[in-house]
Image (cartoon, rainbow, N blue to C red):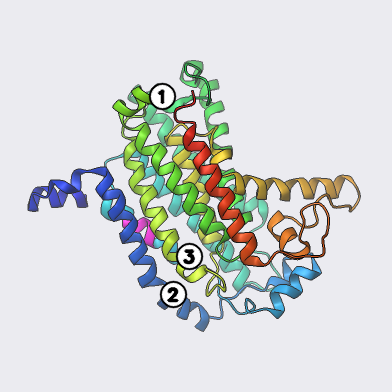
Amino acid sequence: MFPGLFDDILGLHLFGYITFRVAMAALTAFGFALFLGGPTIAWLKRLRASEDTSKFDAQKDLKSLVEQGPKKDTPTLGGSFLIASLIGSVLLWARLDNLHVVLAVMLTAGFAAVGFVDDYLKLTAPKTKGLSPSAKMLGLSAVCLGALGLLTFYAYWYGRPTLLTLFPPFFKEAHIELFEYGLVGVALFLAFEWLVIVGSANAANITDGLDGLAVGCMLIAGFTLSIFCYVSGRPDWTGYLDVPYVRQASEMAVVGGAMCGACLGFLWFNAYPAKVFMGDSGSLPLGGLLGWMAMVSKQELVLPLIALVFVAELASSWIQKLYYQRTGGRRLFTCAPIHHGLQLYGGVFTKTDTRWHEMTVVVRFWIVAAACAMLSLALLKVR
């Protein structure tokens, strides 16, 4: 363990402070991303690892916008160096005797592997869209349930009922102790947390459609959940704020710091006009990690507010698909996900005369994400 090594050999007790390691994890991940980004992008260009967008988008206007613009030959698979930077920083700065951290690394690496296979098939197999939805969901579910299963076993073996308890916001004494319901409670816990984590992964994947959109919103949400994780692992702070105390949860703030740093480094290359796209190899593990941090800090029920942009993007896609099927081909939104509707038609439900520039969409969505983050942090005292 890197911090312990410095403490024992050099006597630098500064490395024992979580807040210091959060900052160093963020800076290290940022440095890794900047260092790896350039060579990785050059390598992907030599491989011609750019996605054939014409086989994905049903909207002709969107096809034309992508194919005729500067994005046509932009390589994808950029999530590979983003996640490598994140995990590398976590291994250096987080305590590896902390189960929350170990399972977070396992979950992130597993989701990244599923995303990488999906991206690789899109780039190498002609006339395909990568993994089938069922195969992708199977892979994500296997990784997620494996991590959740280990956490559940740990909670029962060591008598940690808080790990299997849900805490609704706004109510000081309200909680749902699934630990008390035996196997039924375990099944409910696994099902609910699977929905949170896999749903977050898919929401991040849907949002990844404009330069800097997903990674910028992820940075904001990740920073917010890092604060929640740090607070939830401090018995003095949780006692004052009347929020659930989760032993060892503060260490997940180091993982959150690494996430923010890696996202910031990736944004250096992904800002408009993007030099690289994230792909499923980045969006799926980032979204899954966001859901895991919400679970560890017992903020699963606040996550829809923290990640409102992701929720809105995912919901618009699902609703559009369902509405299209039920009405025989009619569309509720101008285009789904909604960022494309604003980009192409200037409106969500109706077309307008003024399109939103891509950066206008991105920055305004960042503003919404920041406002939701501030509102969610206010809930720390509204109980």
- The segment highlighted magenta reads 85-89
Q: Nearer the viewer, residue 334 or 279?
A: 334
Say what amino acid the circle numbered 3 marks.
Leu
Give coordinates of residue 210: x percent, y percent.
Answer: 62, 64
Q: Between 243 and 113, which is closer to the camera in this rendering?
A: 243
Label 1 residue SS = helix
Return the mark for residue 40: 2
Cα separation, mark 2 vs mark 1, equals 42 Å
Q: Residue at x 49, y 63 (%)?
A: 79
Q: Residues within 10 Å of mark 2 (few under 14, many from 20)?
A: some
Sequence-first disc among 2 and 3: 2
Residue found 41% across the figure and 25% down from its top: 244
Q: Which mark is residue 162?
A: 1
Q: Main secondary structure of the magenta part?
A: helix
**Labels 3 and 1: the sequence-earlier one:** 1
In percent of width and height, residue 285 lies at 49, 53
Dot 2 and dot 3 residues touching (CB under 8 Å): no
179 is higher (above) or lower (below) than 133? above
Residue 86 belongs to magenta span: yes
Per the image, the residue denoted by label 3 is: 267
Residue closest to the far bottom: 46
Numbered disc 3: secondary structure: helix
Q: Residue at x 71, y 80 (%)?
A: 68
Residue at left offset 56%, top offset 64%: 279
> Residue 381: within the magenta?
no
Q: Is disc 2 placed on a helix, strand or loop?
A: helix
